[in-house]
Image (spheres, rainbow, N blue to C red):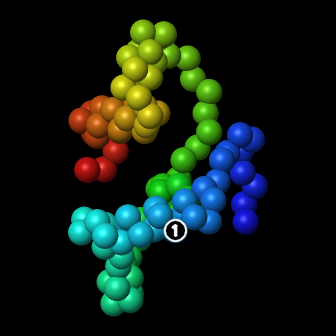
Amino acid sequence: MPKLKPGTILPTVAEDAAITKAALQDPDASPYSDEEWAAVKPLRGRGRPAGSGTKVATNIRLDRDVVEAFKQTGEGWQTRLNDALREWARDHRMLAR
């Protein structure tokens, strides 16, 4: 059994039985059949999504407001910045379309 956080309160055997009984009586919470479980497939694999594999670590100076604007868009801002640079390079015929 995994280590629990301090202060975690586990239900007693009687409470667990009552919870299970209530869950089994709920029509919206019916357990999956073996056939349904066999058909289950993960939406995506574990870990980070596969990248292009051609990334290069670099250190460039950019205007603070530009970086902040991309950071404010949330997670994935570096990818969006890369995409913007790629689009500009393609528009200026620096990269193949």
Instruction: Identify the residue shown where x is 74% and y is 41%.
Output: 6
Residue 39: x percent and y percent? Answer: 33, 84
Q: In the depicted view, which residue is nearer to us: 65 or 61? A: 65
Up-down relation of residue 70 to residue 9 (above or below) = above
Up-down relation of residue 54 to residue 82 (above or below) = below
Q: In the depicted view, which residue is nearer to us: 50 or 11? A: 11
Left or right? Give the position of 83 relative to 47.
left
Left or right? Give the position of 7 relative to 96.
right
Instruction: Identify the residue shown where x is 28% and y is 66%.
Output: 26
Instruction: Identify the residue shown where x is 36% and y is 72%.
Output: 24
Residue 50 visible to the viewer:
yes
Which residue position is annotated with label 1? 17
Q: Amino acid at mark 1?
A: Ala
Q: Identify the image quadrant of the N terminus.
A: bottom right
Residue 32: x percent and y percent? Answer: 35, 79
Where, by quadrant of the figure, is residue 87 drawn?
top left
Residue 84: x percent and y percent? Answer: 33, 32
Left or right? Give the position of 18 relative to 30.
right
